[in-house]
Image (cartoon, rainbow, N blue to C red):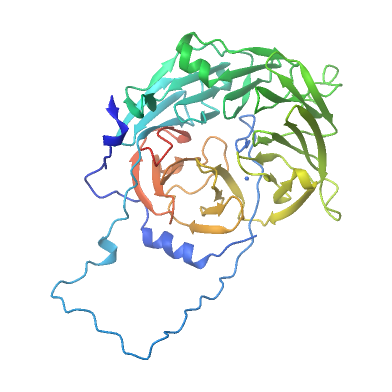
Amino acid sequence: MKSISMWRRRFMSKPPAAKTSWLTALAAAVLLVFAAGCSDDDSETSGETADAVAVPATTAAPVTTAAPTTTEAPEPPPATTEEPEPMDDMAPEVPEVNGRLLIGDGENSMISVIDVGSDTVTQDAFDLGARPTRIYPTKSGRYAIAVATDANDVHVFDGGIYLEPHGDHMDLIERDIESLDVDLSGERPVHLYMGADWAGLFYDGSGDVAFIAEDGLKSDGGDYVAPRINVGSHHGAVVPLDGDLFAVSYRHPDYESDPESYVLPIGAEIVTVDGEVLHQELGCEGLHGNGGNGTVAVFGCIGGAMFVEAHDSSYHGGFVAAPEGEAEDFRLGSVWGTYGLDHFLVSGRAVGLWVVHPHEGAMELLVPAVEGRSPVAVQFSHDGESFLVLMSNGELRKYDSESLTLQAAASGFLAGGVSPDFWERPNMATAPGAIFVTDPGADSVLMLDDEDLDVVHSWDVAGIPNKIAFVGILDDEDA
């Protein structure tokens, strides 16, 4: 163990090999200005594609420069005999990151591991038994949970790099990544959502809901047994809330008579870890997609979005309808929320990206749907202060989570392009100072800085690098 107060290091002695010139990405960012995202950013089944949201072209605003306030001529710069280095030869600075990346393969059941600090790739490090449908880190960044739906199994990994309290300071623990022998097998596990203290896992085939406590993983390791309840099989969802509560989808009453037609739920209930129902909210036809911020859970519906809220032992909910004039088949199917943010990003393939304000009972269009430029992946930053949208044309956009203004943009860095296929499209993960993007078409994983979105490093990963999760140090001040 090392005292964190003594630990600082920079890795990679060689200049990072970017797939595309950082100047190209910078030029793209300059040309863009702000436009007015579980997320269930992945489709719930292997045959689906995510709801698409398109973005209109933007117009750059003029930049003005204040005139000098003095009449004195400025002094000339001192003479020098050194020639400045050409900018093309100046590599972007590589962020200091301590952690590992778990990379799911879109064509087989393997997970590869990238140790970012040592710049090493361990190809096919773990076998899940089926292709991973999703891999998410826990809130602390220490663990990752990988769902292998077609193998009826779920795997928990201890990333091996984390901070541990030790008296008046924190010790940095660094050991090998480990697959924990936690039994999370079940009939068709699909939906996984990560909360602050708990993760919620829904099994479509049985209707089981598993509640996974991070404290339980820390104390019991592979012996941890996750509590479960059953709410009846359907294409369901679960969102952890504060106070050891959960918002769990409510099955359509006609499901038993016609499972194919009524596979989607119609509402949600707030329940305890023992399954006690504290509140029920119905009226969400075609419920799909969900997100939470600790006290509120939002679900996508036909005609708008439904929410439930648990706050100070008070439970209620409501429905936020689409504004007048929207099409009768208006539908929202993906939701993104994060702690500290009162509004939610909600999208639908044909209706665009909307901002839902549950407390105000209102929603507003943020990005209209335009053919040719639709989001294929959305990811909040590790601290929730910004979110990323990867567009179908290969453009990456970074927005401020609170103001929703565009902060940066980059294009042309994905050598393999963007495929709409669930198993072949890029996905993202974030860490302090860095963004990681899989490039399935080019068999690589890219590292971008989180300010200007410059590509600063890349790793070759065989197969189809698809799903991705970062496990490691998430507090850039402590690290």
Residue 118 visible, this orientation: no
- Relative to 277, say whether 195 is above or below: below
- Relative to 288, say whether 231 is above or below: above
Q: The N terminus is located in which quarter?
A: top left
Q: Is residue 466 left or right of residue 476?
A: right
Residue most extreme to the left: 81
Identify which residue, 307 or 102, lies in the foreground.
Answer: 307
Residue most extreme to the bottom: 71
Residue most extreme to the top: 223
Identify which residue, 119 or 310, lies in the foreground.
Answer: 310
Displayed quadrant of residue 47: top right
Residue lying at 33% horizontally and 22% vertically, measured from the top left = 176
Q: Is residue 106 left or right of residue 301?
A: left
Displayed quadrant of residue 320: top right
Q: The C terminus is located in which quarter?
A: top left
Displayed quadrant of residue 292: top right
Residue lying at 37% horizontally and 55% vertically, measured from the top left = 20
Residue 337 visible, this orientation: yes
Query: In the image, residue 24 lies at what x, y percent?
Result: 40, 62
Q: How many marks?
A: 0
Query: In the image, residue 213 lies at what x, y percent?
Result: 56, 19
Residue lying at 56% horizontally and 71% vertically, measured from the top left = 60
Query: In the image, residue 212 lies at what x, y percent?
Result: 57, 19
Query: In the image, residue 444 lies at what x, y percent?
Result: 39, 41
Residue lying at 59% horizontally and 29% vertically, measured from the top left = 195
